[in-house]
Amino acid sequence: MKVKFWGTRGSIPTPISPTMIEDKIRQALRGAVGLDLSNEAAVESYLHRLPMTVGRTIGGNTACVELRAGRQLLIFDAGTGLRVLGNELMKTEFAQGRGVADVFISHTHWDHIQGLPFFVPGFIPGNRLTFHSPHENLKDAFVGQQADVYFPVPLGILRANVEFQPMPAGVWTQIGDARVYPHPMPHPLHGSFGYRVEHNGQSVVYATDAEYENMSVADTQDYIEFFRNADLLIFDAQYTLSDALDKAGWGHSSPLSGAEFAYRAGARRLALFHHDPAADDQAVYAGQKQAEAYLARRGCSCQVVVASEGLEIEW
């Protein structure tokens, strides 16, 4: 299996500001004192050694995750990251109208559907795009966001073969060589769905947009079983723990809650996802350190990563 993140922000696209760029440059220059800037190899080596908070950025696109499971292309959510993924897919068979993709929608809040109008493969005749979700109003939501009062191009202008297929929650559905299990997640107002994908004995759980109001064993056991032994658990960690308490009812979780779930479920990797648009890179990576420290105290070897644009995880 191979996962690539194309959009990892929550709520609203969050482009990096000029001030943030200046700050990263300033930090990089401070660390380069004494470096021979005329030596290209030395400069490249220095850039590779920079911490993630200085040398890179998490990115500002909203939720979109690519999963390759054997021959299957599975896409989770259609936030603005879908536009960038679409541009990459146009370097493949999708440019000739021979592409096939299955898209799984967690829910239809803007940050999870707003990329579709800019998904170039959708305009190429012959491509096959199948949208799946237990939400009954899935097609209506996509049609609605492209009503002329909001957007000049209606959904019907897409020339690819686009289908919307409802799928039952709590039931395994076979998608080519993979199987997918949608699970209801606690998120206002109409709920969200997480997805567990299994292929050749490997598993990924995509569990965004969920707020676990009670972390007791009894109240979380159902989610623990959904996450059980996942090779990769992609987890909504939008808020710090204190922010999550202050924003009760907003529908999101924290890195520490993700660490607790990963520990109890025996997950191999935890990817912190759906980052708060108000959080800069340093704040997000601070959440990673908290999760790692928590797991270390529990004697758990689960790897914690920050989901960032372009990050690939393969096993």
Image (cartoon, helix red, strand yellow):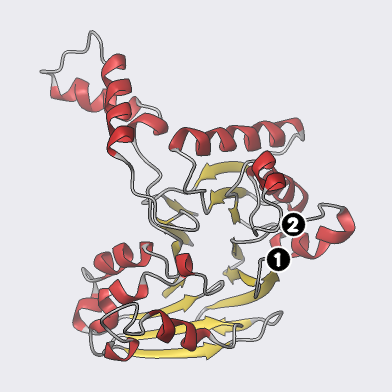
Q: How would you rate the neighbour count of disc 2 (Cα within 10 Å): few for under 14, some for 14-19, many for 20 or more?
A: many
Q: Is residue 140 above or below residue 290?
A: below
Camera sees residue 70: no
Residue furthest out toward the right = 218
Horizontal arrangement in the rendering, residue 40 relative to residue 119 (left or right): left
The picture places residue 2, in percent across and down from the top left corner, at 45, 60
Q: Are marks 1 and 2 in contact (CB under 8 Å)?
A: yes
Q: The residue under label 2 is which amino acid type?
A: Tyr
> Disc 2 on helix, strand or loop?
loop
Give the residue number, with chain letter if any, for mark 1.
186
The residue depicted at 16 percent of the width and 13 percent of the height is: 36
- Count of numbered labels shown in the rendering: 2
The picture places residue 98, in percent across and down from the top left corner, at 26, 84
Q: Is residue 299 above or below residue 180?
A: above
Q: How would you rate the neighbour count of disc 1 (Cα within 10 Å): few for under 14, some for 14-19, many for 20 or more?
A: some
The picture places residue 222, in percent across and down from the top left corner, at 80, 65
Q: Is residue 252 above or below residue 41?
A: below
The picture places residue 299, in percent across and down from the top left corner, at 75, 34
**Cα gap from disc 1 to disc 2, whole angstroms:** 7 Å
Q: The residue under label 1 is which amino acid type?
A: Pro
Q: Quadrant of residue 167?
A: bottom right
The residue depicted at 48 percent of the width and 82 percent of the height is: 141
Give the residue number, with chain letter if any, for mark 2.
212
Q: Earlier in the sequence, mark 1 or mark 2?
A: 1
Where residue 91 is drawn, which disc sits there? none
Horizontal arrangement in the rendering, residue 168 relative to residue 98 (left or right): right
309 and 171: which one is in front?
A: 309
The residue depicted at 59 percent of the width and 76 percent of the height is: 180
> Disc 1 on helix, strand or loop?
loop
